[in-house]
Image (cartoon, rainbow, N blue to C red):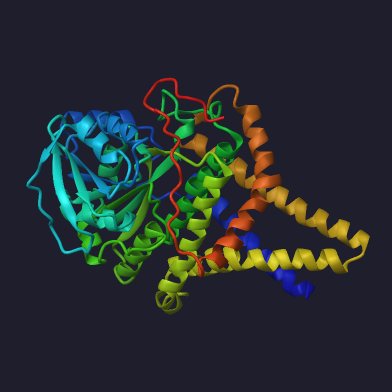
Amino acid sequence: MDLFITIFFLISVTFPVLHIYHCLPFFRDEDERTGANKGLKRWKIEHGYEQEEGISVLVPCFNEESIIETSIESMKTLAYSQFEVIYVNDGSSDGTMNYLREMLDLKTSELSPQGSLKHENVKKVYQSQLYPNIYVIDKVNGGKADALNAGIEYSQKDLVVTLDADTILTENALAAVNKAFKDKGVVAAGGMVHVLQTKTDNPLKRLSLKNANMLVRVQVLDFMKAFYISKLSLVRFKALAVISGAFGVFRKDILFKVGGYRNSIGEDIDITLRIQRFIAKKKQLKITFIADAIGYTELPETWKDLTKQRLRWQKAYVDCVIHFWAFFLKTLFTKPVSFFYIFETFLIGTIAAYFMTGLVTYNLITSSENSILAYMFFYLFFLFLFGVLYDLVALRMNKHYGFRFQKGDGFRILGTILFDIIVYRFVAVYYVMYGSISYFFNKKWNKVSRTGRKYNQKKSETAA
């Protein structure tokens, strides 16, 4: 039993250590950039030295009245000419459609569908008279995947960017996307997503924790670990299984070839795995991560909304294990994406939560007092060691890619790391365990509440 526990423990720490090591700059691919030439890239585009590919930005909207103004204002700041924006009003029951009419001055458009993806009935398509590159699709409610399929159908450009309604792009984000997709082997990509509550007046260099409560701050660390460590490492292994729904990029023809989005609880994981399955036998095609393409998305500020989000994410992981099981089994030892999804995400990330919880409980009941203290010390020591190490590497990688926190955030970061290790790690285990079980009883797509904050103002309201 002790040997089994030791082996299991070693396997559990192998993946995090591997990602920490593999995300370091020494292992970056030739086409990866650190963002040092953003100004040069923009100058080249503005002066015609770098051809712009056409980009369609799709924004599904279901009851987004409180945040839609922030999204529209951000679209007006993008330093790119060959792009269109398509807002898909997915049967909103609030004032979303009225806001779109008011802010965009809509007129009926003759825009027609381009393919054959299935989606709910489109009632009418509009075009803005103020901003001719912005369109609105008004359709019957069908869910986020359905709305994205409708947007793909009506998009007119070769590249498709998908954003959540609460995601805003930085000025140079589309230029970075354009550069990455000059490589014809790239069929899909994810952009870098930071937390909207930390956005400053210098969104390409500075972040601030001042107006974020502790729950948002710990999610900031979570995002840095997810993007700058896990995603970066998995891309280099050719094993990325999740392109964030907050900021994804795809070649439109690939989306048609894989049949678009499946109506599921985790459409972002599902579409990534569909593409991975499609390119499994095509070595020249790949999915990448564009660190220079920066977006900001709003995160939950209450435990209630965070729980909704994280349970939905865990259900999505389980859903995809079941749906793609045949693909995973067939390519388990031949394709990195299958290996990492099954061994890291499913076995170590999910099954291990039950095993370790049962093991800890058993030892606490059956061991002597001294053994309990020794065991808990050993367990907490390694939890603290790897937790602090992961957080510190994420912060260092954040700095490597050009981002620094505001002066005065040092103590806030220290407090957040302690909260992450002492509290949040154990809450995350609950999300994994409860979410995995509840998937079989409830597959509802629980929407997180928006704060309604106006992020385009220079001084945003506090999130504390």
Q: Nearer the viewer, residue 43 or 56?
A: 56
Left or right of residue 336, residue 42 in this image:
left
Tell me if residue 257 can be seen: yes
Residue 95 in the image, given as x and y percentages of width and height: 30, 38
Residue 315 in the image, given as x and y percentages of width and height: 49, 62
From this view, report whether residue 45 is shown above or below residue 349: above
Left or right of residue 433, residue 267 in this image:
left
From this view, report whether residue 5 is shown above or below residue 414: below
Q: Which residue is found at the position 34% from the left and 44% from the top?
A: 63
Left or right of residue 245, residue 299 in this image:
right
Q: Which residue is found at the position 58% from the left and 65% from the top?
A: 350
Looking at this view, name the residue that lies furthest to the front: 93
Tell me if residue 186 can be seen: no
> In the picture, residue 347 is in which quadrant?
bottom right
Residue 163 in the image, given as x and y percentages of width and height: 33, 45
Instruction: Name the image quarter holding the C terminus.
Output: top right
From this view, report whether residue 424 is shown above or below residue 344: above
Residue 162 in the image, given as x and y percentages of width and height: 30, 48
> In the picture, residue 444 is in which quadrant?
bottom left
Q: Which residue is found at the position 50% from the left and 49% from the top?
A: 226
The tally of labels here is 0
Q: Nearer the viewer, residue 451 or 200?
A: 451
Q: Which residue is found at the position 51% from the left and 44% from the top?
A: 223
Instruction: Name the image quarter holding the N terminus.
Output: bottom right
